[in-house]
Amino acid sequence: MDQHNFDEKKLAQLADFLSGEMSASEKEQFRSELASDKELTEKFQLLKQFRSHHQFQEREAKLRKAMHAPGQKYFRARPRTGLFRRPVLIGVAALILLVIVFRFFFQDANAISSLAAEYLSPPASLSTFRSDDATETEQAQRQILEFYEAGNYQEALALMEKIQDRFTTEHSSEYFFDLGILQLFANQPTAALGSFQQVKTGHSHDLRWYRAWALLFAGEIDSGKAILQELASNPNPFRDEARQLLRDLP
Amino acid sequence: MRLTQILPLLKHPDHKYIAGLLDGDADVIEEIYAQHSQKIIGWVQKNGGNVEDARDVFQDALITIVKQAEKPGWELTCPFSAFLFLVCRGRWFNELSRRKRQRVTLQDMAGFEIAEDAEKQAEHALREYQEYQLFQKAFNELKDACKEILSKSWSGIPQKELAEHLGYTYGYFRKKKTLCLAALIELITGSEDFRKLKEE
């Protein structure tokens, strides 16, 4: 009898023994064989396990079914609380972004402010009041000029805005240029840009110079540089300053 | 007092959970989930998993415990919570190893006094379950005819009756069953997982 047949025969006997298919005397004899044959004992244990494992499959299926509901109930991802809630996280992310943007912006703004201290100075006087027919606005003029010369641009601007209707179309370009200057030095660059837009005549180079500054202060660096580039390329009173400024700008 | 009267008194008070699991008692299962789920979620999350992983680990651990507990004469000898945690830890360790994580260093769970006894019980339960998984895998690889013959032969019905039911002679049925058993043994003992299990 070869090994294979021997194994098959023993295996069949083991299966018979486990399923109770042996007579009492066969059982007795097989038990004594089991006690003396280590390999047979191992296989016996294995077959016993097979039966128990197979029977457990049904129990496992029932248990998993019974555990499904509590599993869903107790193992839900809990909504995050405190600092880890989604809105808070979004808020924090937005804040970080804002800080980065502002840091970038203010870095430019700081650089421009320090350049302005070096390169930017207000016109010697306001052109509106250089005109000859300013008698009607004499008192207001005096006050505005006083404020302007003292560097009180906010006060000068407040008065300047009050007298707008006193200027005829003929003098409106002068008025809006000065208004823009006051707005620029009162730290209102966007308003200054609006006023400079109203200047239709005169102020060719100085308008561009101050407009460039208004753009730089408003954060429109590229547009400001473009105007400075024009000034730097052609002969005009601001050419050298424009060239220098272009080198120094961030 | 007889031994049979003394034995129940020696059982660990937490044996009620084991009894409930063995009975498939829905109230006991709910209680176990209510008491231990959050701790296991927290622990699994600390050890590289998420809530879904924790749910699977927890369910598998309870199945592992039941598989061990159904063995005749098995008794819980340690607090159920410690036993459950250790089985969960073992299951999660195996899962991480399966996912081929390079370094598997798991933290213990705070608040558990883990006695050596609990470690041993958990180790046995996990090994038993690994053997069960090996069996399941191998059994599923058998041909359908073998699956049917073996399933029916393990149902407790007399073999001659089964042979007749399946339309075989008893001799043919017996031969076929033996061949199926041999194939199953070969699939299990020839597997890499079986070799690893034996080496442990």
Image: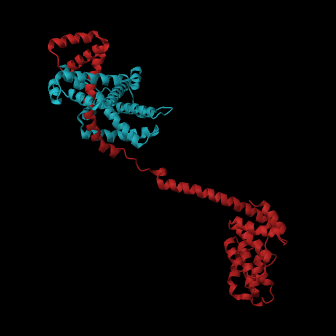
Chain colours: A red, B cyan
Residue B95 lies, in percent from the top left, at: 42, 34
Residue A217 lies, in percent from the top left, at: 70, 67
Q: Is A1 placed above or below A197 here?
A: above
Q: Residue at x 28, y 13 (%)?
A: A6
Say if residue A188 shows up in the picture: no
Q: Quadrant of the N terminus of chain B?
A: top left
Query: For this view, does B143 lie left or right of residue A90?
Result: left
Q: Nearer the viewer, residue A6 or A60?
A: A6
Say which quarter of the image contains residue B99.
top left
Q: Residue at x 20, y 23 (%)?
A: B172
Q: Is A75 placed above or below B159 here?
A: below
- Count of numbered labels shown in the rendering: 0
Residue B156 lies, in percent from the top left, at: 18, 26
Residue B3 lies, in percent from the top left, at: 20, 19
Q: Quadrant of the C terminus of chain B?
A: top left
Say if residue A237 shows up in the picture: yes
Say which quarter of the image contains residue A1.
top left
Q: Residue at x 26, y 15 (%)?
A: A10
Query: For this view, does B110 lie left or right of residue B184?
Result: right
Query: For this view, does A212 lie left or right of residue B185?
Result: right
Q: Is A174 placed above or below A13 here?
A: below
